Image (cartoon, rainbow, N blue to C red):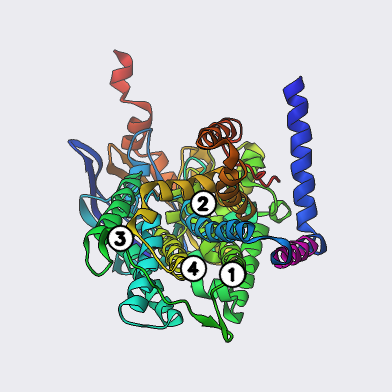
Amino acid sequence: MNTEKNITTQTRLTDNIYAGLEKKPVLYGIFALLIVAVLLVPQFANNYLLEIFTNTWFYIVLCLGLNIVVGYAGLLDLGYAAFFAIGAYTTGILSSQFGMNFWLTLPFSILFSALSGVIIGGPTLRLRSDYLAIVTLGFGEIIRIAARNLSITGGASGLIGIERPYLFGIYLSKIHHFYYLFFLLVILAVIVSYRLHYSRLGRAWQYIREDEDAAEAMGINRVQIKLYAFVIGAIFGGMAGSFYAIKMTAISPETFVFTQSAMILLAVVLGGMGKIPGVILGACALVLFPEIFREIGQMRMLLFGIVLLIIMIFRPQGIWPERRN
Amino acid sequence: MPLLEVKNLTLSFGGLMAVNNLSFDVEENSIQSLIGPNGAGKTSAFNCLTGFYRASKGDILFQGKSIFRMKPHKITAMGMARTFQNLRLFRNMTVLENVMSGMHCRTRAGALAAVLRTPGQKAEEKEIRRVAEECLDFVGILHHKDRLARNLPYGDQRRVEWARALATKPKLLLLDEPAAGLNYDEKEQLIDLIRRIRQELEITVMLIEHDMGLVMRVSEKITVIDYGQKIAEGTAEEVKNNPRVIEAYLGKEDEDDD
């Protein structure tokens, strides 16, 4: 009886949320409020808070990128940090070793992350089942270990002194510069994700996730369509990596360990795969939770783990409610 | 030149010959059927034609070009669409979205066009929607377009499959047991629909069917197979009186006496 009642109140709430969001003025109102709030934060917040927020924006971009692979196309990628590393190292090497302007490194970053996506995805996406998970897991480790042992990547100590760029005549150096820059990236990532989702390609991903054979019978080349998702996800990761490199001015291989990939994946699954607001929520939880509970020291990761476990048991579809019909 | 020519098609799983040296033609603008008792290899043959199984030997010519061992999505793009014996809808998507999938191979907007929302991409999206709605209207369930496919009654789910196949703009439509699970009224509507598909859309139809009454009424030519081999071919009248067909369906007379 009781659970039945819970379910009905819950679904009613979900319906109300969606009914509200479907009205364009309501939706735009919420967006405008959010954006104004975000733009005003640097007026009040101290550097510590700004740092955390900037970090949150950064993870939102990474999570939205992985969401295209995992959420939209339903492919399990366990080495997403590798693409993030490729972007960061491309920018790092080109600017610190060759003195290239940051903005000029971006096309290379896109090129190399996309290329690595094709090299890894091309052969493995032909196979059904979860070979991709194992290959990406290995790929993530290969990139990290290669970065640690090559001289061009600075070995285990990594690269330092990556030159920060100018944007509209402003030298990007203060934390609030990066706060705004990364927020801009979030907006871009959301727009790109949204538009992809509601497009021919976005639907094709969904068809394949729903029923691969039926999708093939409808004339959809599943290997090609999956490769698209994989490569677009890789480009998101590469871009995020490039911006990470100029924010930190230094990168080391230990940033790109397996736990990094696992945490990003976790945020996507936790928030709700394939749902943009859910993924954003997941990314926020990933960054904010450990910060909010900093006082309890090492225990906080344990607590985080327990909370995750509880959420996954009771809401396997993620925090964000499912759209209903 | 026939629209589809199947020549000496053979498919074996290990030692088992699921399809054995099967040859038949499908004439343009005709309605044909492939029938046979349970386990005769009808669906296996179908799956070879549509690329889902890779046949071992033989050749399949579609509009004079070989599609033998081609990938399913390429065959669909060439103009041969299929439905599935067991419903294979995209269950958690709306009816309209289901049917829009058919237009995928007739359109080409990529990732960049989608992100930039180019005029071409927008026009294409409109066209996809228009064709999908037209196909839904043709099978008579346009009013369900915004419902989730899984929430539809069974008969209407079948219609979604037909509409989805029609949306690929095929020249040849292969229906795998379209009448399975339909009631009397729905079967009558199906017969009407198959005739309309040929007449109004000028699409050649080939079906696999268990329901003999339906097959006899609707098809101009029937190919009967058993144990993967063709045992008879001809009009409904010819096939009905063929002793080998009767034997395949009912067993030999002297066996019954034992």
Q: Amino acid at mark 4?
A: Lys
Q: What residue is disc 1 on?
A: A188
Which numbered dot is residue B194?
none
Tell me the chain of label 1: A
**Does label 2 lie on the same chain as label 4?**
yes
> What residue range appears in magenta?
A28-41
Q: Element at badge 4?
A: helix
Return the disc, 1 or 4, that comes first in the chain's sequence: 1
Residue at coordinates 32% horizontally, 63% vertically from top-left? A158
The residues bearing labels 2 and 1 have C-alpha atoms spaced at a distance of: 18 Å
Image quadrant holding the N terminus of chain B, namely bottom left
Q: Which residue is mark 4?
A: A247
User: Image height check: is A204 above or below A289?
Assistant: below
* Tags 2 and 1 both on a single chain: yes
Q: CA distance from mark 4 to mark 2?
A: 28 Å
| Mark toward the start of the polypeptide (1 vs 3) | 3
For disc 3, the chain is A
Callout 1 amino acid? Leu
Position of the C terminus of chain B by quadrant: top left
Image x and y of residue A77, in percent: 40, 51
Residue beneath label 2, please?
A71
Check residue A163 for magenta coloring: no
Label drawn at residue A157: 3
Q: CA distance from mark 3 to mark 4?
A: 18 Å
